[in-house]
């Protein structure tokens, strides 16, 4: 029989819980600049995001913080300095009084199997959720459950049923149970979730596996796009919290931040906090120009002044006759691509990048559907170009429909 865990936690005077997910800490190279701290500027931005979220919890007297999975990005390539700085920030937050609960996401396992070890277990001062856990909330009738990511859908459903039964047994004697917020947290890959603006997951698990008579609120990591997954009338909504910062151009235009559950607000207890209301953080932007007048107007737009030095730009031109020098002088981080040309990274003025595709299109479609394979095994230039191509193919209905 699989193990289940039960605990009782005290939410303190605020009666709030903070949720965030998919930090994907990594020494990203595109657009990153060297710093005096021995890590790139993009990683320092990730570290700033983590500390900003912790500080928000402290300032608002939120004692319990739940991370919904994918703390690190590359499972097999993790530099010790990256681990040490992330672990240091987490341990400092724990020393400042935060109770930190970390759900294991698919990127948090060293190998792609449910029994794989995880480096997160080496971080001090945190509660690692690697077995289904039911939290009772002191002075409240509400229940909060959490479960890790499962590479096997069958294992995920099996443990969910056990967690359902345990929760049902604990709440059946609670008066006015219909007014309670029984919440399930996890790192779920569900049919119907949107990846980016276009692609919709068609496997492996249906949201209908969740019993609406037990958990009336579900929050998940894994999908970077913050969204509410609407299911049938008989089943409750699934809330994907979304990444707290943008990682690639595939996250472009996504809302990014974290969620706060306020148990003093009844059924309307979810509050989404956009990260850009707490600080100045870069975003990924794609700008396409077809005339010289468009370039000039973009360069002189007052609202772009801060963005030019902060954000990561993908500049596209539809004609080889366009002159981008005035724009490029303003941008700190950019890469340029012209129609029918390969990409040229912003940190090199003379070296272009060839895109070498080793597999046939059917193999790439399989990789596209299995999102984590693309993130881990492919070069960043190849990945962005492939995703863009497959999105266009999908829209035309030639392969993925």
Image: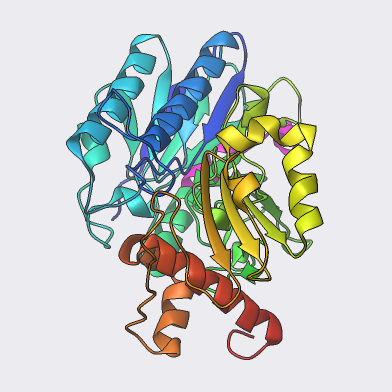
Question: Which region shows up in magenta?
Answer: 166-182
Q: Which residue is at a point 59% across and 16% down the rendered structure image? A: 139
- In this view of the protein, which residue sits in the foreground, 175 or 73? 73
- In this view of the protein, which residue sits in the foreground, 254 or 181? 254
Tell whether position 19 is magenta: no
In this rendering, position of residue 14 left or right of residue 32 = right
Task: Indicate the quadrant containing the N terminus: top left, top right, bottom left or bottom right.
Answer: bottom left
Figure check: 397 above or below 30: below
Tell whether position 168 is magenta: yes
In this rendering, position of residue 120 left or right of residue 210 = left
Q: Quadrant of residue 39?
A: top left
Identify the coloring. rainbow
Figure check: 247 above or below 273: below
Task: Indicate the quadrant containing the C terminus: top left, top right, bottom left or bottom right.
Answer: bottom right
Q: Which residue is at a point 45% across and 51% down the rendered structure image? A: 346
Q: Position of residue 316 (x, y in %)?
A: 63, 62
Q: Is residue 108 visible?
A: yes
Q: Is residue 215 visible?
A: no
Q: Position of residue 35 (x, y in %)?
A: 33, 28
Q: Position of residue 366 (x, y in %)?
A: 43, 80
Q: Which residue is at a point 51% across and 43% down the rendered structure image? A: 333
Figure check: 70 above or below 310: below
- In this view of the protein, which residue sits in the foreground, 225 or 204? 225
In this rendering, position of residue 58 left or right of residue 105 = right
Q: Which residue is at a point 26% across and 62% down the rendered structure image? A: 113
């Amino acid at each position: 029989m699989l193990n289940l865990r039960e605990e009782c936690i005290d939410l303190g005077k605020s009666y709030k819980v903070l949720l965030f997910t998919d930090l994907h800490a990594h020494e990203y190279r595109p657009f990153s600049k060297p710093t005096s701290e021995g890590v790139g500027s993009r990683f320092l931005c990730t570290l700033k995001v983590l500390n900003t979220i912790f500080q928000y919890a402290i300032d608002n007297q939120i004692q319990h913080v739940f991370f919904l999975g994918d703390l690190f990005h590359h499972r097999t390539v993790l530099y010790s300095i990256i681990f040490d700085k992330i672990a240091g920030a987490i341990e400092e937050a724990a020393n400042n009084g935060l109770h930190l609960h970390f759900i294991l996401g698919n990127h948090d396992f060293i190998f792609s199997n449910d029994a794989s070890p995880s480096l997160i277990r080496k971080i001090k001062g945190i509660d690692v959720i690697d077995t289904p856990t039911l939290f009772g909330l002191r002075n409240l009738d509400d229940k909060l459950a959490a479960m890790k990511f499962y590479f096997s859908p069958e294992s995920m459903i099996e443990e969910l049923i056990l967690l359902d039964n345990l929760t049902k047994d604990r709440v059946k004697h609670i008066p006015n149970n219909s007014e309670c917020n029984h919440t399930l947290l996890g790192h779920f890959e569900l049919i119907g979730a949107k990846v980016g603006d276009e692609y919709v997951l068609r496997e492996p698990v249906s949201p209908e596996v969740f019993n609406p008579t037990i958990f009336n609120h579900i929050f998940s990591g894994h999908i970077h796009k913050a969204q509410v997954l609407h299911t049938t009338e008989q089943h409750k909504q699934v809330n994907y919290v979304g990444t707290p910062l943008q990682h690639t151009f595939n996250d472009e235009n996504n809302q990014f931040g974290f969620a706060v559950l306020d148990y003093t607000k009844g059924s309307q207890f979810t509050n989404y906090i956009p990260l850009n209301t707490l600080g100045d953080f870069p975003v990924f932007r794609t700008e396409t120009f077809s005339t010289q007048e468009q370039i000039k107007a973009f360069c002189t737009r007052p609202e772009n002044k801060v963005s030019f030095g902060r954000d990561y730009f993908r500049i596209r031109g539809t004609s080889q006759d366009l002159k981008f020098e005035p724009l490029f002088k303003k941008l700190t981080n950019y890469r340029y691509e012209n129609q029918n040309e390969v990409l040229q990274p912003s940190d090199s003025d003379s070296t272009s990048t060839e895109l070498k595709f080793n597999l046939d299109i059917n193999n790439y479609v399989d990789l596209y559907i299995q999102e984590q394979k693309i993130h881990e095994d492919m070069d960043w230039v190849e990945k962005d170009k492939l995703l863009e191509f497959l999105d266009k193919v999908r829209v035309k209905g030639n392969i993925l429909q």
